[in-house]
């Protein structure tokens, strides 16, 4: 019935997550409220990890992509589940440091890392830096020299694969701000250059073709292209690379129209392609690294809102206004994304009318869901928007000086605050 089979309905007809009544959660912690199902979060991490063990003889590493939802809490869960993590800014790295994340399992991305960020990474012993461009390569070599170390690096490669997803979240094509391209020789040249530097050691390649992708085929194609490039580097430069990082991007179910591939299927299929292509090119089988974010955390999250008003504009549209909006979930305004929702206090009621769920920001485009079929909805109802675990909290803002919601983690009937709700005082704390 719901996009996540881990949600249920109790005898009061209320939506239940992690054995917690969502209406009670809304009462106890207030709304809007981000709720994360810790058990599902762990389960999703294990699906990837187990599949890597099963289909790739354990010669793989799953990194939790922090950009999807980065807090000390999520870093801790990833650490406990034995995952590595990727970070894409000094702030994400700092969070991982503060969560005592094992630094050798941290991979640092980004197309414009500052010298300060590189310093922070090197001085904290970050395992791998994914170098994006020549400026970064030279800066990093100097910083590593200053610290008397040789830094392990990978290069961000644009494999030239066209992933079928929203153009804002496509990243593997040549016209992208990320990384170096294969087809114009840029990637080959930068690696040749890196081999001459004494304080960096290239041990792998990285690519990420995009996000919310449903086909396996572009991932296989990317893996093949990357391995062939590894073959070329071995043949032409004598460079042996033992790691291949294939990024994240696996699609999830936001509505019933989405049909994601089971995640272990991706790993099974991609592993096969990697092994076959490595054999064809006479390469040792590399370690593979994958960086799922959305598919781990999105299904584990819901957001609870309180309905404050219903505006029925006859023959035009019925707006249902809630106490959050683009500040806590900017994905509709950015990508026209689609979500499912449930009236949490009347969870089994059948959909009967088409409504548009609007936020409370001073912006007409501030919608959460356009044209969704919902049951009769009344002021004071609790509305749960589903699968909001990824790229909601992490992309939230204080637009209109609206405080960010709290994040509550639930597990087996218990709940705890992992990020407290912002206050008005928080909003003015940097004003001087
Ligand atoms: N690795 C790299 C290098 C990435 O750039 C990304 C996502 C990931 C891993 C994780 O991808 P995932 O498995 O979560 O799809 N804000 C957008 C998504 C942007 C994704 C950026 N990179 C959204 O809300 O849809």
Image: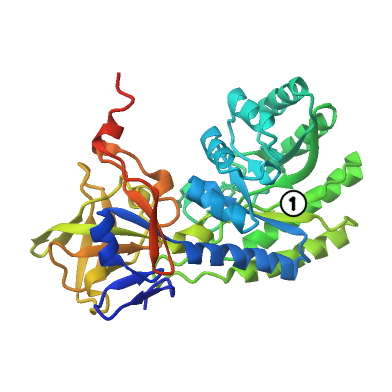
At x 81% / y 48%, what residue is drawn? 230
- Mark 1 CB near ligand 1 (8 Å cut): no
Question: Toward the viewer: 416 or 385?
Answer: 416
Query: At numbered mark 1, what does the secondary structure look like: helix, strand or loop?
Result: strand
Furthest toward the left, the residue is: 314
Please name the residue shown 55% across and 39% down the image. Answer: 98
Res 337 → quadrant: bottom left
Q: Quadrant of residue 52?
A: bottom right
Q: Quadrant of the N terminus?
A: bottom left
Q: Is residue 218 left or right of residue 353?
A: right
Give residue 274's position: percent from left, percent from top.
77, 61
Task: Please tell me how crowded label 1 is: few (under 14), some (14-19), or many (20+) other residues with Cα within 10 Å.
Answer: many
Quadrant in the picture for the C terminus: top left
Q: How is the image coloured?
A: rainbow
Q: Nearer the viewer, residue 241 or 334?
A: 241
Which residue is painted at 22% across and 74% down in the image?
A: 346
Up-down: is 373 above or below 121? Answer: below
414 w.r.t. 5: above or below = above
Q: Residue 341: x, y in percent?
A: 30, 66
Q: Which residue is mark 1?
A: 244
Pick the residue in front: 339 or 345: 345
Q: Is residue 422 left or right of residue 298?
A: left
Whether residue 186 is visible to the viewer of this picture, yes or no, is yes
Can you say whether 258 is above or below 115 in the image? below
- Percent coordinates x, y for residue 200 in the rendering: 79, 31
């Amino acid at each position: 019935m719901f996009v996540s089979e881990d949600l249920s309905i109790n005898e009061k007809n209320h939506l239940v997550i992690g054995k917690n009544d969502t209406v009670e959660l809304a009462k106890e912690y207030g709304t809007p409220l981000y709720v994360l199902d810790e058990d599902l979060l762990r389960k999703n991490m294990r699906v990837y990890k187990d599949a890597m063990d099963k289909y790739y003889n354990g010669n793989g590493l799953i990194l939790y992509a922090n950009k999807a939802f980065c807090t000390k809490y999520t870093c801790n869960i990833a650490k406990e589940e034995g995952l590595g993590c990727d970070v894409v800014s000094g702030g994400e790295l700092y969070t991982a440091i503060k969560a005592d994340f094992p630094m050798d399992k941290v991979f640092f991305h980004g197309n414009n890392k500052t010298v300060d960020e590189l310093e922070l990474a090197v001085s904290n012993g970050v395992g791998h830096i994914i170098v994006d461009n020549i400026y970064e390569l030279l800066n990093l070599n100097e910083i590593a020299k200053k610290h008397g170390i040789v830094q392990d690096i990978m290069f961000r490669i644009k494999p030239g694969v066209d992933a079928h997803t929203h153009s804002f979240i496509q990243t593997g094509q040549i016209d992208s701000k990320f990384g170096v391209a294969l087809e114009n020789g840029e990637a080959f040249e930068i690696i040749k250059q890196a081999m001459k530097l004494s304080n960096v050691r290239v041990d792998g390649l990285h690519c990420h073709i995009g996000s919310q992708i449903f086909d396996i085929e572009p991932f296989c194609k990317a893996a093949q292209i990357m391995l062939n490039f590894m073959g070329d580097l071995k043949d032409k430069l004598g460079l042996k690379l033992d790691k291949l990082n294939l990024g994240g991007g696996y699609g999830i179910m936001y509505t019933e129209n989405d049909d994601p591939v089971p995640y272990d299927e991706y790993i099974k299929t991609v592993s096969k392609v990697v092994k076959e292509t490595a054999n064809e090119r006479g390469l040792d089988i590399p370690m593979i690294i994958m960086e799922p974010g959305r598919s781990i955390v999105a299904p584990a999250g819901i957001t609870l809102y309180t309905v404050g008003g219903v505006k029925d504009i006859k023959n035009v549209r019925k707006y249902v206004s809630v106490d959050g909006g683009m500040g806590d979930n900017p994905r509709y305004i950015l990508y026209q994304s689609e979500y499912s929702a449930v009236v949490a206090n009347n969870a089994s009621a059948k959909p009967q009318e088409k409504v548009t769920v609007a936020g409370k920001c001073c912006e007409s485009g501030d919608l959460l869901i356009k044209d969704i079929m919902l049951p009769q909805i009344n002021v004071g109802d609790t509305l749960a928007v589903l699968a909001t675990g990824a790229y909601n909290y992490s992309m939230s803002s204080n637009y209109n000086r609206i405080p960010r919601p709290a994040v509550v983690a639930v597990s087996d009937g218990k709940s705890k605050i992992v990020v407290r709700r912002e206050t008005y005082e928080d909003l003015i704390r940097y004003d001087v």
